[in-house]
Amino acid sequence: MIIEEMNYSVLASLFLLPTFFLSVDLIGPEAERGCLSFDERAKKKGCECVVYQSTGQPGSRTFHSPNYTSAQTYPRGIICILFSFIGDVNETVEITFIDFNLHPKVNNRCPDFLKLYLDERAEVNEQSISEYDLCGNMSDLPQKTFYSKGRSLHMEFHTAPDGTLNNSYKGFAGKFSFVDSKEFQTTMKPVSKDPNTCSYTDQHNDNSLNKGRFFSPRYPQNFPPWSSCSYQFFARPGEIIQINFLVFQLSGNASSCKKDEDYIELFENRNKTERIAFICGTKSVPTITSHNNYLSVYFHSKSNSNKKGFAATYEYKSIDSIVHKCSRNITQASSPAGTISSPRYSNQYPADVTCTYDFYANPGERVQIKFTHFNLFKSQLYTQEGDCKLEDSVSIYIFESYDEASIMFCGDRLPLQYMSVYNWLRVRFVSLPGGDKGQASGFEFQYKFRKDFGITTGLQSMGDNGRPLCKFLYNSTVQKVGNFTTPNYPGYYPSYTHCEYVFRGEPGERVTITLDNFDVGRGGVCEGKNDHVTFTAFAHDGPDRGFKPICGVMQSLITKRVSDGAYFRVLMSSFDNYEHTGFLGRYEFSPDYKVIFPTTSSPEKRSGSQSSSSDIPVLDSLCVIMLSIISLSRVNMLS
């Protein structure tokens, strides 16, 4: 039967009837008496029925439990009342609870309950399984709004017999409407005809629309668990793709998304290495804009989280329309690695544009920047040693509270790899006013958030709360020969960084250390606030008089050191500069009789550095002779 414009007093009188029989006289002359003919389950269970059908008119109407408007509580002993909402073809039913107050669970069961059936068919039968069994109050509901899978939605209401429970609960009330199902249909093309495949693509061309929409599976209903969907967008050359999430309801914490929860990833290349966003949770998501003409969105759901999912729009835009919106905040949680390029890359970038990219790593971790292309416009005043403030430039900032660039690049020389001092770093691109930029194609750099300081060998130590330390262990039992480097090698090592490399050999072994491409601090006094490298055979802090610290620019032969025993440490300390590249270290564990030529521990004079040869112990020369004789004797004995 059809219920239209039923006033609250009539409906209240209706539900006060002892048998809850719905009289045609009480609800209007156009209503049909009893349940729909195909509601067999309702007939068998003795259900009374309330049917709401679509009128084809926009807007919402209301529904509520018996006595909701006329009494403080709903009646006891309701065997079954079936609320049926029936839409037209291509309509979806939407119901929203405004109030909900039923008896809470007792021994984990609902004595009074409202079952929801979101079935695609218009009837409820013996095989029907309810999607939700609701009781308690509004805070106990998994959500406030529910949608049908097809054109119908049913609610089945039951209450316990009188006298069995405290009857101080008001019931429920809500609103319902019939929505055009086309509003929830993606405008993208499915990759496969298989309905179980959730993969879509959209190719922008002269014959297609420049905007559309896409959704999570089953939207607007909750998405199913263990879903994986892909959405790929192909814009025309000179265009970018812009994504807006209108609805976003996933599990997880938006500030620290994890892959064992529901999440969405967005990539700017097909092999999924350039991730520009990693999002989850229920917070609103800002507009996401690609930096080239390709974008892919990947949605993954895990266990049943009872979340609605997402509804999003996409739009293809000319790259000229977004050049002034190139700034970004990038967190380790959203995008642990990726690529950033100048506006319109690799074409001529526009004039009078400033782009700021702020990177936020986790505590104790670093941001690494590696330029793969660099070609900025050079004015007539440009010189390679000139001031970049008068040129188009890229600047790097390492202190968040100090708005002055640590280093600035201009021209077309590819900058060296760079690393932050702490867990924050800013890159700022400035294109000065002045019209045509000639053949300048801009820049491109890769970024990566790193726990390992860019040191890829050895076993890293962790501090309190899992904070990564620049301390690496090299065991002879793991590897006899290998390499180690300063942070960020072969780029500039960061300032205010102290690293420790510990070498543990087996009994009877020594370790030989050679530092290639050595460039640490300024030459001269290798201590204090001048960057330097120290060697020690002791596990505790403090100087080792047998090995002098070294600094400046040095040849590999001069940096070679041999331990006295099976244990050795190398310590590198940097302070306030960003001008040196560090070293590529080599280590080798070997039996002590194979170590024939230990080297001195002092630097030589090179490139203006002061020589410390006066510090060479006289005994070093004697040690060389004695060890050579002993080693030759051992070789003769073995032969």
Image (tube, rainbow, N blue to C red):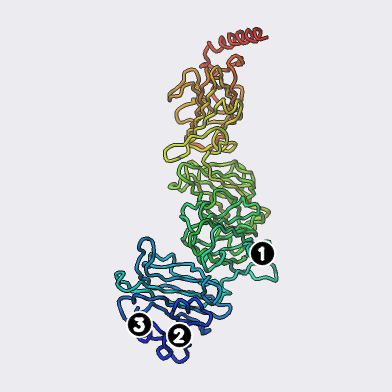
Camera-side residue of 32 and 499: 32
Q: Badge 1: few (under 14), some or many (20 or more) residues near its Cα, within 10 Å?
A: few
Q: Quadrant of residue 88?
A: bottom right
Residue 428 vertical placement versus 540 (above, below) = below
Q: CA gap, disc 3 to disc 1? A: 52 Å
Asked if disc 1 and disc 2 are in contact, CB closer than 8 Å, the reply is: no
Picture coordinates of residue 589 (x, y %)? 58, 22
Q: What is the spatial separation of the Cα atoms under label 1 and label 2, in whole angstroms?
A: 40 Å
Name the N-terminal-most of marks 3 and 1: 3
Q: Which residue is mark 3?
A: 18
Few, some or many residues within 10 Å of mark 3 (<14, 14–19, 20+): few
Q: Could you tell me the amino acid type at mark 1? A: Asp
**Which of pointers 3 and 2 indicates the residue nearer the eye?**
3
Residue 352 on image: x %, y %: 57, 58
What residue sits 52% from the left and 18% below the top? Answer: 565
* Residue with the mark numbered 2: 3
Circles 3 and 2: CB atoms closer than 8 Å? no
Q: Which quadrant: the C terminus? A: top right
Name the residue nearer the viewer: 120 or 524.
120
Task: Identify which residue is drawn at 59% across, 44% down.
Answer: 370
* x and y percentages locating residue 584 in the rendered image: 59, 31
Which one is in front in this view, the residue at disc 3 or the one at disc 1?
3
Q: Which residue lies under the disc numbered 1?
A: 194
Amino acid bearing label 3: Pro
The residues bearing labels 3 and 2 have C-alpha atoms spaced at a distance of 21 Å
